[in-house]
Amino acid sequence: MEILAYGVQADEQPLLEKAFADRHSLRTLAVFLNRDTAPLAAGYPAVSTSVNDELDAEVLAVLAAGGTGVIAQRSTGFNNIDLDAAAELGLTIARVSHYSPYAVAEHAWALALAVNRRLTRAANRSREFDFRLDGLLGRDIHGMTVGVIGTGKIGECFARIAAGFGTHLLGWDIAENPACRELGMTYTELPELLSRSDLVSLHVPLLPATHHLIDTAALARMKDDAILVNSSRGGLVDSTALVETLRTGRLAGVGLDVYEEETGVFFTDQSIQGITDDTLARLVTFPQVLVTSHQAYYTRTAVDQIIDTTVRNVDDYAAGRTNENTLVPKG
């Protein structure tokens, strides 16, 4: 089967090519799938996409008209895909239902530690041979109250690391995780978690019910010197409200691996032309904010698992099978 893969990173390309070798014919593109690039898939029965590709009804219609039958998304999230339109067009949609939760949890902690200990500022100073400590005062993680919003597989991994630091754990989720209970986590309502936590980390999926879960009211409940980390989905945080909160001098640190308007910006080089998103431009100017480009998942272990699952999804489609990763079965 011939496959066209969009949004392939340079590190990812050889791994994809090796995994598909002797199984299917693979062509990789660095460009992302959108209305302009969708016609490139004409004649390809299978298309593989990344989380920042656009798969709205119009794009899906172009793919279907060009002969595509299956879309294998190389991510867990699928909020970028119009599943109803895919079903109407008879397209099969598959995703990667899980991969290493440690990758994301560890990156979330990397962000938390970096903003707490002002590592970006310290590293930039050292490059200029400025070795002063002014403005680099951090806090012990040990003894902090850590709020974990979403205690599934990734949230549990984050909580295990938190327990290793010797923190007090608070959790919020629609269902309690017994493993987190065993770590000493106390489940609370969200307002209480926000008001009591020194560090808040987000690990819930982006759904209509969680869109802008961290809004103006939620930010107002947080401690003035709290740390906020989001390594899940950008839409969980109202970015405009976050800018206003930071502008008033509140929050000691913010670590963001995702941003609600990241599509078309993250995974690309914007260093020459700059960005037109005023909110993102403002966020990165705050000294206590650290933004990374949706890289929390980006470890060799996780990427290998993502690619292996993508290969299996394509194999199963070719054999007329569905599996646990199938979001929309063959029409």
Image: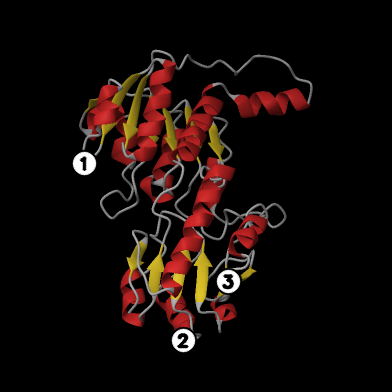
Q: Is residue 33 above or below residue 283?
A: below
Q: Is residue 6 above or below residue 320?
A: above
Can residue 185 be seen here? The reply is no
| Image position, residue 90 (x, y; %) | 35, 80
Locate the N terminus by quadrant.
Answer: bottom right
Comparing 191 with 144, the one in front is 144
- Numbered circle sitting on residue 285: none
- The three-letter code of the residue at mark 3 reads His
As drawn, is 117 to the left or to the right of 58? right
Measuring 56% from the left and 60% from the top, which residue is drawn there?
A: 264
Amino acid at pointer 1: Ile
Measure the alpha-carbon separation of dots 1 and 2.
41 Å
Which one is nearer the viewer's eye here, 237 or 224?
237
Q: Nearer the viewer, residue 232 or 71?
A: 71
Q: Report the front residue among 9 and 56.
A: 9
Q: Quadrant of the C terminus?
A: bottom left
- Mark 1 nearby-residue class (10 Å; few <14, some 14–19, many ≥20): few
The kind of secondary structure element at disc 2 is helix
Does the image show residue 116?
Answer: yes
Which residue is the site of mark 1?
Answer: 174
Dots 3, 2 in contact, CB < 8 A: no
| Residue at which label 3 appears | 24
User: Mark 3, residues whose alpha carbon is within 10 Å: few (<14), some, or many (≥20)?
Assistant: some
Q: Residue at x 42, y 44 (%)?
A: 232
Instruction: Tell me the amino acid under the disc marked 2.
Output: Ala
Residue indicated by mark 2: 65
Q: Mark 1 and mark 3 in contact? Answer it, CB < 8 Å.
A: no
